[in-house]
Amino acid sequence: MSPTAKSVLNDVFGYPEFRGHQEAVIATVTRGRDALVLQPTGGGKSICYQIPALLLEGTAIVVSPLIALMQDQVAALEQLGIDAAYLNSTLDAGAQGRVFERLHGGSLKLLYVAPERLMQAGTLERLSACRISLIAVDEAHCVSQWGHDFREDYLLLGELAERFPAVPRMALTATATAQVRTEIIERLALHEPERFVAGFDRPNIRYLVQGKQDARRQLLGFLSERRGEAGIVYCLSRKKTESTAEWLRSQGFDALPYHAGLDGETRAEHQRRFVREEGVIVVATVAFGMGIDKPDVRFVAHLDLPKSMEAYYQETGRAGRDGQPSVAWMVYGLQDVVRLRQMVDESEADEAFKRRERAKLDALLGWCEVTSCRRRSLLEYFGDTLDEDCGNCDVCLTPPEVFDGTVVAQKLLSAIYRTGQRFGAMHVIDVLLGKDTEKVRQHGHTDLSVYGIGSELDQQQWRSILRQLLVMGLLSVDTGGYGALRLNDRSRPLLRGEIELPLRKDLLVSRKAGKTRKAARTVAIADADQDLWEALRNCRKRLADENNVPPYVIFHDATLLQMAVDKPQTPDALLAISGVGQTKLERYGAEFLEVVQEAV
């Protein structure tokens, strides 16, 4: 009797039940239909094409944009006893030839290929001579010019519809608005695809956002309870990734920089350490992350503002793919806004593209300043809903105070106007505070009526007010004039007192948030025997090193935790644990059972 999708899930992958739309997606493509699959990061997208690959005759082609993802996925599949391979630039001619031999011999079930390699005439010709069961396009949002991660190589993938008309095709992504989903279908020429759109919510991720004051001090405060945890810290510039990683090392953290300016060997080594070792922090530009299949990233921190909600959602989605409690933490400030807007304005893109990018940045800024549940606002941006407040974001845990900001906003706008709308935030705030700086004296601003009228607030409070007015469109930044602040049409009604303006007090996230999260994780470890938990982790690390794979490829943390709680004594009891399939039971079962038996 031929295997079913459910039996493959249980026997090969070791999971008792499908999640979300997985089973329906598999049924769709095994019937020969095209599919668009939108699942949040960590939602199990790979199962949607890996199981059909095992059920159908022939080889499934998986289009993947990053070498690291291909290598990790193939290593994980090989640990499950599945014949898989990849084609990319790391293979020499001999190794590529051996992959094609396996392909033509019919033994390969999955072949991972980069889009630029797949669309070469020679590759397409050789694939046309083979039995192709399925084509899965991963990270499909890369095809969209409306998306945040557009890649030109993806535009050619629509040709696959003509080249392989009888082969079902699947587009998968974790991040796509309704507009981007439509563009994916059009550009990939999917034929009347079934659409499977899962909810965007990642309830295990706690969202924490702070106004930027002393970013390093704030980061250190956040990380103080997270020593020994794996995480990613995102920065906007290469230089900042280097200096931040060095500073974190001086504070006792195992931190490594990662950006496109590093040589390939260094990048590969830093990525290898992050994936295979525990407790490593990578400080990176956005060059790092897509395709990193590491489930136990406990936090993602942003020291600079991302450029859009889509980018933020995808980057934070790299935390907690194993479903365990994780944190997305960010600090942002006015300089982030000015710099990102300058990058847009100075780009060579057309004006329509620039307008879209500015709108995306404004949406993210607006989200940073919300006074209601942060998760609900995030989901609403992607067309998703949450019935009630999440209770797991900074706004829910520590509701922000709101005050009547009409008078202080008028003072700020007046200072911008009186100084000639020619200066940036720092100088305007110095005038409001009555500071005796050389620049203030040089321009005669000590004689202005607005000099010193804002002394009731400090510099950080003025920056918060300035940022909120900018987000609300009540003033503008002249990016071509070195960030000079300027009034606009919406400033005038406020100056004239025709409207009232409620503003948010820019609070630091209270310690309550961090402590709540830590308690949740401690309970999970406390339920398991701590010594047994460590012994299981040590066993996993030793086996991972022996097999030259990351520890999570042997077993995820959640599987080890269940072992520590259930303390299985027999192979059948071990097989009943989620994540333990038949192949892994045969390969590693005896060693993990021995660890449990020694501890009991």
Image: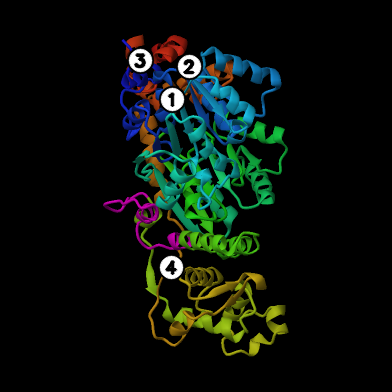
- Say above or below: 434 vs 259: below
Residue 131 magenta-highlighted: no
Q: Nearer the viewer, mark 4 or mark 2?
A: 2
Work out whether mark 2 precedes mark 1 in sequence or the reverse, and give the earlier one.
Answer: 1
- Local crowd at mark 1 within 10 Å, few (<14), some, or many (≥20)? many
Q: Which residue is mark 1?
A: 50
| Mark 3 vs 4, N-terminal side | 4
- Mark 2 and mark 3: span between their CA atoms? 19 Å
Residue position marked by numbered label 2 in the rendering: 82
Residue 557 image point, x, y percent: 43, 28
Q: Which residue is mark 4?
A: 505
* Tag of residue 360: none
Q: Which residues lie in the magenta part?
A: 365-392
Residue type at mark 4 is Lys
How many marks are shown on the rendered structure? 4
Determine which residue is flagged by label 3: 575
- Amino acid type shown at disc 2: Ile
Q: Do callouts 2 and 1 mark residues in contact (Cβ within 8 Å)?
A: yes
At label 1, the amino acid type is: Gln
* Element assignment for label 2: loop
Is 387 included in the stretch rendered in magenta?
yes
Name the residue rendered at 59%, 75% in the picture.
Answer: 485
| Relative height, residue 583 to residue 523 (above, below) | above
Residue mark closest to the camera, 1 vs 3: 1
Question: In the drawing, does residue 433 fall left or right of residue 295?
Answer: right
- Which percent across, then down, holds residue 56? 40, 20
Query: What distance separates the C-alpha of mark 4 from that of mark 2?
Result: 56 Å
Q: What distance separates the C-alpha of mark 4 from that of mark 1? A: 49 Å
- Evaluate whether residue 570 shows in this view: no
Distance from Cα at disc 1 to Cα at disc 3:
21 Å
Residue under the point 49% across and 44% down: 187
Q: What amino acid is labelled 3 in the image?
A: Leu
